[in-house]
Amino acid sequence: RVDPTKGPLGVQTKNVKMSMNPFCEIAIEEAIRLKETLVKSTKKKDAAEVVAVSIGPKQCSETIRTALAMGADRGIHVQT
């Protein structure tokens, strides 16, 4: 629900599932492709690392889990 009279505090996020922006999903996929290409060309398994970062409340941790499931190596959650 959104109450425009309350400004930025008018957005209620209680019981709302947080999901990854489609453009961020594309960026994660491309980062994983780049990593795989680099690993193949250098033959070093640790040649690159994909790190997913999310800033927000506890519910944002689901977004990091999605990135990890897609193939990201690490996830960082900055809780607000």
Image: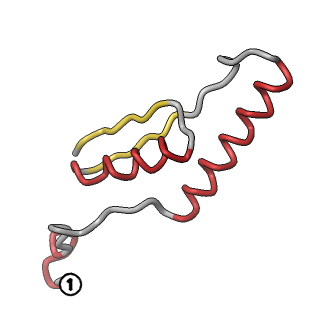
**Residue at horizontal 42%, vertical 35%?**
75
Q: Which residue is mark 1?
A: 4
Is residue 44 toward the left or the right of residue 28 in the image? right
Name, please, the residue furthest toward the front.
69
Mark 1 nearby-residue class (10 Å; few <14, some 14–19, many ≥20) = few
Q: Is residue 25 above or below residue 37?
A: below
What sort of colour scheme is used for the picture?
Answer: secondary structure
**Residue 49 sits above or below residue 34 on the image:** above
Image quadrant holding the N terminus, namely bottom left
Nearest to the observer: residue 3 or residue 51: 51
- Please, what secondary structure does the residue beneath circle 1 have? helix
What amino acid is at disc 1? Pro
**Which of the 4 image quadrants contains residue 41?**
top right
Q: Position of residue 32 (x, y in %)?
A: 66, 40
Q: Residue at x 48, y 40 (%)?
A: 52
Q: Position of residue 15 (x, y in %)?
A: 17, 68
Q: What is the x, y in percent for residue 26? A: 63, 57
